[in-house]
Amino acid sequence: MGDVLLTVHNLHVSYGPIRALKGLDLNVKKGEIVALLGANGAGKTTLLQSISGLLQPSDGQIFFKEEEITGKDPASIVKRKVIHVPEHRQVFGTLTVIDNLYLGAYHHYRTTGKRQIEEDLKRVFSLFPILEERKYQLAGTLSGGQQQMLAIARGVMAKPEVLLLDEPTLGLAPIVAKEVLELIRELNQTLGTTVLLIEQNVVSSLKIAHRAYVIAHGAIVKEGLAQELLHDHQVREAYLGQS
Ligand code: ATP
């Protein structure tokens, strides 16, 4: 793990009079899983949406590698392979599983070619065998956990350099949530995918992450190695009801 892929510097984002981010700083290095922790309304989703170009910051900068990407449009961020898997899955319910996966590769279809995309599909199916079993099923008929896996797998088809995952286990039964987090770890270990992860389950996310940041009221209030934060008494007090 070395090169910094993503740098956020002094980021300010507002919704009209509501200041959601107030000078936020963080970085994500190649090969890392970085977890973002924080209470409801702390600004986590706002941060991911700003990185992927869905929201315009009023101040501050975002860099991907050496290049400033602040305020660029979402399509050009996707082209740089910064891929956002938003909250609530958002798969195309009336399309089949396999068509959802092909859509993930849409932006690089012309440059990559069909053969490479079929290779990518094979690799995705080896990571997500349930999706291969159900490839001709309509995505809307999958279970919640399977739809979440499909949303992540579609992100993987886009060949991400950085995957931005917003609450991938939201609404899932604990055992399914555990499977989804295990898959994220596997993706990171086998493909080397770099991940910036918002996850409500603090302990589970710290267990798979390398580092973590705690956001409160739109700014970072704590950062460190995931293993250290797992044992930090402030974090335990705030999120686990223990000290
Ligand atoms: P959650 O876990 O609840 O999704 P979060 O940490 O992701 O929380 P954000 O959704 O980024 O937090 O919200 C940050 C702040 O911005 C909150 O005060 C929220 O009420 C406000 N906010 C978010 N979206 C909007 C919007 N579309 N319009 C107005 N205010 C918003």
Image: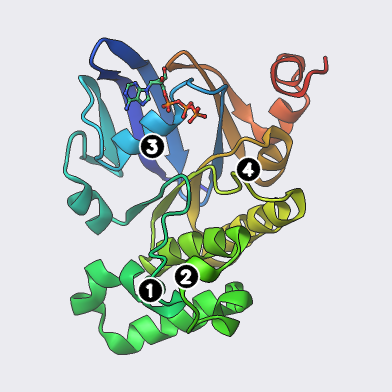
Q: What residue type is disc 1 on?
A: Leu
**Alpha carbon of mark 1 to alpha carbon of mark 3: how far?**
26 Å
Which residue does the numbered mark 4 point to in the structure image? Answer: 209
Q: In which image quadrant can residue 79 be found? A: bottom left
Pick whichever of labels 2 and 3 is earlier in the sequence: 3
| Residue 167 drawn above or below residue 177 | above
Task: Identify which residue, 29 or 125, lies in the foreground.
Answer: 125
Q: SS for tag 4?
A: loop
Q: Are marks 2 and 3 in contact (CB under 8 Å)?
A: no
Which residue does the numbered mark 2 point to in the structure image? Answer: 139
Q: SS for tag 2?
A: helix
| Residue 118 drawn above or below residue 174 | below
Pick whichever of labels 1 and 2 is earlier in the sequence: 1
Pick whichever of labels 3 and 4 is earlier in the sequence: 3
Q: Are marks 1 and 2 in contact (CB under 8 Å)?
A: yes
Left or right of residue 49, residue 125 in this image: right
Pick whichever of labels 4 and 2 is earlier in the sequence: 2
| Residue 202 drawn above or below residue 5 | above
**Alpha carbon of mark 2 to alpha carbon of mark 3: how far?**
25 Å
Point out which mark residue 48 bears: 3
Between label 3 and label 4, give the one nearer the viewer: 3
Q: SS for tag 1?
A: loop
Question: Residue placed farthest to the top in the image?
Answer: 17
Please tell me which residue is depicted at 46% across the width and 29% down the height of the picture. 44
**Alpha carbon of mark 1 to alpha carbon of mark 2: how far?**
6 Å
> For mark 1, does the 10 Å Cα neighbourhood hold few (<14), some (14 to 19), or many (20 or more) residues?
some
Left or right of residue 19, residue 232 in this image: right
Q: What residue type is disc 4 on?
A: Ala
> For mark 3, does the 10 Å Cα neighbourhood hold few (<14), some (14 to 19), or many (20 or more) residues?
many
Q: In which image quadrant can residue 212 be found? A: top right
Q: SS for tag 3?
A: helix
